Image (cartoon, grey):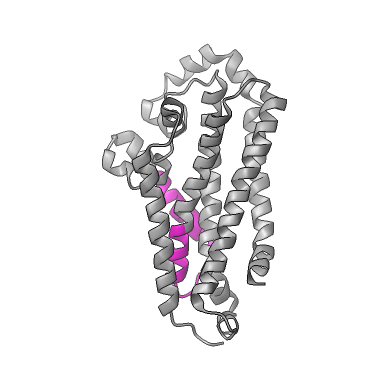
Amino acid sequence: MMLLFEFRKSFRSWLNFTIGLLLTFTIFASFFDFFREDAALMDQLLQNFPEEFRAAFGFANVNLSEVEGYLSFIISYIVLVGAVYGMKLGVGLLSAEPREKTSDFLLSKPVRRWEIVAAKLEIALILLVAQALALFTLGLAEIKIIIKQPIDVGIFALLVFAMLLVQLFFLGIGSVVAAAASKIKSIMPVALGIVFFFFIIELVNESLHLKELTYLTPFAYFKGSSILTLRHYEWPLLAIDLTIFVVATGLSFWIYQRKDFHAV
């Protein structure tokens, strides 16, 4: 019952973001012919920009005239939008009841606090996996219809599910923020602020090339150029990403168990 309620409450937001991701993919995919036909001109134009700029915006170390290279460029923007949704979902997990002043009503039900958090996390995971699968499935269809070029399905899967892995990072961080905060009046400013904080760290990382900064931002964990070169994720960075998700969600359980809620 709780799962169904949470699903209904979150579905509209999920649908809006998923449609937004697919529209972004469609718009970028429609420009592939332009990039392929004028690859030399684009290459010459991009050489005028600093390497840090090209790396930050997905142009470095990829060939935009090839399908895989162009898709890795598209996915870098898809990941950013997906990260905002993951963070929004994480912050919204445990902040809804305090914001709507229904915490005392929920906690008066015959359900344990850890079960509340578990149900909310379960729905969040279902929504994120469904979003990634929708993007993967419909993205492949759009590649056939719009780009009309053969594609390595395995590489495309790695690129798409990199978004899911980044979303898990922000889902965990968001759940801790929601559990720790007494009340969050508006979710989106918090979600945008935290996501762009980590994105700015990635921009600085691309400029300074400090390996230490790589470990601080999930946007550095699953770069398209690295996926195309290695044909797999970098295992240490994947482990860091999943560890942060597990630790953060565990911490949100712990905080929520001990949190005081004010009766209305």
Q: Is 99 displayed left or right of 23 in the figure?
A: left
Q: x%, y% of residue 150? A: 63, 21
Up-down relation of residue 263 to residue 165 (above or below):
below
Q: Pick whichever, 158 or 74, lies toward us.
A: 158
Q: Which residues are magenta?
A: 172-200
Residue 185 visible (yes or no):
no
- The quadrant of the picture occupied by the C terminus is bottom right
Q: Quadrant of residue 99?
A: bottom right
Viewed as shown, does residue 81 lie left or right of 20? Answer: left
Residue 85: x %, y % from top left: 56, 52
Tell me which residue sits at (40%, 44%) in the image: 238
Farthest residue toward the right? 145
Is-magenta flag for residue 177? Answer: yes
| In the foreground, 46 or 142 | 142
Task: Locate the N terminus by quadrant.
Answer: bottom right
Does residue 13 appear left or right of residue 94 in this picture? right
Relative image position of residue 87 (x, y in whole percent): 50, 56
Query: Is residue 15 shown to the viewer in this render?
Result: yes
Which residue: 44% across, 65% down?
A: 177
Q: Decide whether residue 219 is among the magenta residues.
A: no
Residue in the image at 53% along x and 87% along y? 263
Which is the main secondary structure of the residues drawn in magenta? helix
User: Does residue 226 sit above or below 102 in this rendering?
Assistant: above
| Above-or-below relation of 135 to 66 | below
Q: Position of residue 8 (x, y in %)?
A: 69, 64
Vertical comparison of 106 with 61: above or below = below
Q: Residue at x 57, y 59 (%)?
A: 124
